[in-house]
Amino acid sequence: MENSLHNFELFAAIKEIFNDKMPFNKVLGLKVKSIDFKRVELEFRMRDDLIGNYIRKTLHGGVISSVIDVTGGLAAFMGITEKRAAETLETKLASLENLGTIDLRVDYLRPGSGRIFTSSGITLRTGNKVAVTRIELHNDHANLIAVGTGSYMVS
Amino acid sequence: MENSLHNFELFAAIKEIFNDKMPFNKVLGLKVKSIDFKRVELEFRMRDDLIGNYIRKTLHGGVISSVIDVTGGLAAFMGITEKRAAETLETKLASLENLGTIDLRVDYLRPGSGRIFTSSGITLRTGNKVAVTRIELHNDHANLIAVGTGSYMVS
Amino acid sequence: MENSLHNFELFAAIKEIFNDKMPFNKVLGLKVKSIDFKRVELEFRMRDDLIGNYIRKTLHGGVISSVIDVTGGLAAFMGITEKRAAETLETKLASLENLGTIDLRVDYLRPGSGRIFTSSGITLRTGNKVAVTRIELHNDHANLIAVGTGSYMVS
Amino acid sequence: MENSLHNFELFAAIKEIFNDKMPFNKVLGLKVKSIDFKRVELEFRMRDDLIGNYIRKTLHGGVISSVIDVTGGLAAFMGITEKRAAETLETKLASLENLGTIDLRVDYLRPGSGRIFTSSGITLRTGNKVAVTRIELHNDHANLIAVGTGSYMVS
């Protein structure tokens, strides 16, 4: 039970950091929708300044890659944090500062049309320092807009 | 000579589109610095809202992937456009609307610290529809922050 | 019914090409296990000369990337072929000669231990010329050894 | 001077392992051509069983990805080993056993035609455990056949 409380606090703290303390996440309007050790979900809304193609009014490719990077990073962090169960809440949160993307692949499958976009991330492999994640971005018509695969490190 | 004039107009028009007509490029503060058929260079300045890591004050990974995607896209478009020399200026510019990233890899090599960042892109292979590009992002201390490889299509 | 017969012949011919006419597939001992427009499965057995790490006796990374490339290519070809339903069997098979990988990402998740390995491929997006595919490689203990994402073109 | 001797022995031992002790490297006919901490070069010859496209008689995509993976791995290992200068020769060589590819991207630029192929690898970033490398594969007409980018770990 204590552990559940610990995790509840951990999840809330991570959510706050991603939603409120990463300036560019705010530019994107990106919000953590759900979070646990196995799967994370983030959400953002279409806005005029997120547009890349001014004729088609679709998401800029950079918005898509940004969201996929954040989603993969959060999924990787959750996976690595689960492996470090013995650490204190403070130590876990402090290690978030050392989270970095090693590399990321993004596949742009369909034009980024829609009003609300949801990205979900899972880990394919989690080591003590490195995690490999897979990410999907859907619009509010359940179209798969883009997928990603990323390797992340917590040094 | 007419051809040079044509290219001069083409480059100016493309520059204007990338600088002024793609809303998210403005969010990034991204400007085309130099452009020709073989190599393109873009530039942007550090700003508080481009930060990802609020403790280290470094660029958000999504800013890096965004800039790399735009740079690769511009390089790819220039390569494909060079192959379509016979087309009119209007047709060339219209095809920009159909430029899309197929996929992109970004390798994050060093923290995104600096005041001014420059990304450069070249094409490794250019077909009639598909181009493969390589991109590098440096800061104003000539540190290589990130590299990318991307495949683009003009449909 | 004629269409089913056409597809039956098509699948058999493609299987024969992948199993018997691509010399390096024979080096790998790679065999098409199942095939249709939506999903393909290939299989190969561990052999001493497929080893990379001579101490751990695990698959060479190149064997893994090779199998993933072939699997993605076959999945892409099936997707593109389905879109070209109106073409004759001969035309479809002839286009196989023009199938090429644009680019491929492979993530090595776990050591390549096992006796029999199965790779499966699906398409994430299929255009008239370009297809994006996802590939998974499992061993005979259902461990996920590696995943891949690849873009392919039929020119 | 002792250090040079140490390195000479180290390079010779690594060369022997790559040339003679990795079974699948022998299948590929892959040989280390030159080696130092900053750059490595490997070489192999066209052979009938390395063919993928039986009509065009070009290299199998898997041969290309295999060679690129090995080249990147060797470059990564050299980079990481340079950082571990204080270790004994035995410790360095033992760590080769723990070298693994995290992920790899391969871009197939031109058909794999030629008689002799040379791949070269450099590191873009080297940490204590992770290195990011870039690889190029040329044929004996100096055509760039493929490029790759790979992340490797020595655990």
Image: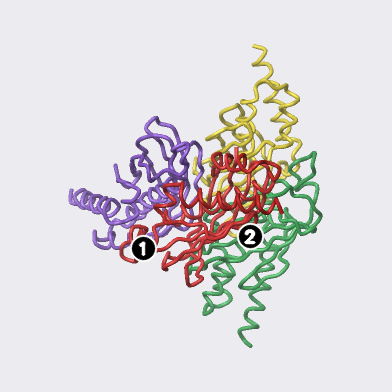
Chain colours: A yellow, B green, C purple, D red
Of the residues shown, which amino acid type is indicated by label 2?
Ile
Taking the spot 41% from the left edge, 59% from the top edge, the residue there is C100
What kind of residue is marked 1?
Asn
Depth check: C45 or A108 in front?
C45
Q: Secondary structure at mark 1?
A: helix
Q: Residues within 10 Å of mark 2 (few under 14, many from 20)?
A: many
Res. C71 visible in picture: yes
Question: Residue shown at 76%/56% (left/top)?
Answer: B139
Q: Are marks 1 and 2 on the same chain?
A: no
Residue designated by label 1: C98
Label 1 neighbour load within 10 Å: few <14, some 14-19, many 20+: some
- Left of C82 or right of it: where is A137? right
Q: Is residue D95 above or below residue A35?
A: below
Q: How many marks?
A: 2
Seen as rendered, the residue at the extreme top is A1
In which image quadrant can residue C93 be found? bottom left
- Residue A2 versus residue A146 in the image, above or below: above
Q: Write the residue at 33% across / 42% down.
A: C44
- Where disc 2 sits, the SS reads strand
- Whether residue A137 is visible: no
- Disc assigned to residue B135: 2
Residue D98, horizontal then vertical, whole percent: 56, 39
Tell me the tag on residue B94. Answer: none
Mark 2, chain letter?
Answer: B
